Amino acid sequence: MVSLSAIDNAIHMIIGQLLESYGHDTLDVKVSRYGSGHIHKTFLVDSSKEQFILQSFNQKVFPYPDRISGNLQLVRDHLKENELDYKLPLPMKTTEGALFSGHGDGFYRLFPFVPGKCIDKVENPQQAYLAARAFGGFINACSAIKTDGMEEVIEGFHDLSLRYRQFENALKSTQVKLEGEVKEWVEFYKKQVLLVRKFRRFVDILPLRVTHNDTKINNVIYADDFNKINAVIDLDTVMAGYVFYDFGDLVRTVVCTEEEASTDWEKIDVDLEKYAALLKGFGEALGDKLTADEKASLTFGGEMMACIMGLRFLTDYLNGNVYYPISYPEQNLHRAKNQGLLLQALQGKREEILDLAEKL
Ligand code: GN1
Ligand code: MG
């Protein structure tokens, strides 16, 4: 049997009180780990009557939980007022009307359980198409919300210039020896300054929209038969952003022939059929709403999101792995290498990708 970590133990101690604070039954409750997100710790709660998702909220990564609640309230109100049929599993309210339940030092949230499957890798273009249509549909459903009412939940979250500077600072202060593979990937990411310049040019001309900002493939729940998507989840980073962020993170996690955690380096490549399926799904959901500049930014988005994640993983490795949980010491270096190889594959196939994107 696997030993329980401190957080699992804490959950078992407080689960009764926690369910009570939401007015739920505490009989025969079973709790087990759920999903594969990096930031919050997620559990499935099986009570005698119902199932819920319970999350131990990461306050270090999200220092302004009220901003999350405010942004999601705007989305919730907008969907309701406009009778838009776009279902979002939002956090439930406690009996006192709060969206969080505090126990000791911890901060917890309860969500309605959405049945279905979360995957880290799509098997075919149809799954890619469905995910892109769902995330594109989210931007479309939110397109009339004014972005000035949205607050920044993590400052500079997808700001490539900022992430590049953070990487440069980590290089100055790191305890890690810059040799071998580390040196190789540091040099690779240093060269991506060209993408940083392109990023600045795009943000100068593109409109801000309400975007999801964490559209990795495991943030949708497919129906068990994979014929539709039951929900888009992980809504904490919903805020003002650019369409290429959301399309780009889909590219990063859908068209790569290997998962983000893979170290099978020679197998990392780009699947163009899945790329075409992403364009089709995204285009169907909001094609006629996109400006010509936004359409032109999509190809850049895939490269930019692979680059920003690689930079963030490498920066975290240089800083001593303080942000992303790891299961072995080199994991963040390996994640950065994985994203770097993906970026190289995307850049190598840029012409073919541009041809696909032109049909949008
Ligand atoms: C984190 O929590 P999760 O796994 O959905 C991260 C994303 C990264 C992703 C990389 C708040 O998302 O930005 O793309 O890991 N979320 C935050 O897999 O940093
Ligand atoms: Mg997630």
Image (cartoon, grey):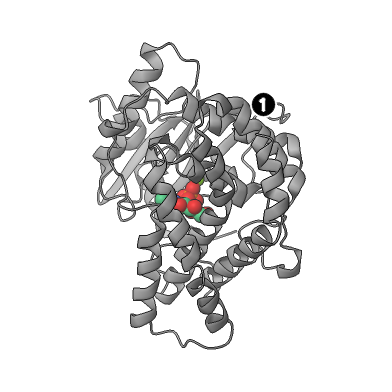
Asked whether, in this view, residue 323 is left or right of residue 192, the answer is left
| Residue sitting nearer the eye, 131 or 281 | 281
| Residue sitting nearer the eye, 359 or 75 | 359
Residue at left 60%, top 52%? Answer: 252
Q: Quadrant of the N terminus?
A: bottom right
Q: Residue 280: horizontal and vertical position, in percent?
A: 67, 32
Asked whether, in this view, residue 66 is left or right of residue 302, the answer is left
Residue 164, by quadrant, is bottom left
| Residue sitting nearer the eye, 153 or 88 | 153
Q: How many marks?
A: 1
Q: Residue 302: horizontal and vertical position, in percent?
A: 58, 51
Q: Is mark 1 within 8 Å of ligand 2?
A: no
Residue located beneath label 1 in the image: 228
Label 1: which secondary element: loop
Q: Residues within 10 Å of mark 1 (few under 14, many from 20)?
A: some
Residue at left 67%, top 26%? Answer: 228
Q: Residue 142: horizontal and vertical position, in percent?
A: 42, 25
Residue at left 33%, top 19%? Answer: 77
Q: Residue 205: horizontal and vertical position, in percent?
A: 40, 43
Q: Is residue 117 visible?
A: yes
Q: Is residue 39 visible?
A: no
Residue at left 30%, top 52%? Answer: 155
Q: Quadrant of the C terminus?
A: top right
Of the residues shown, which amino acid type is indicated by label 1? Lys
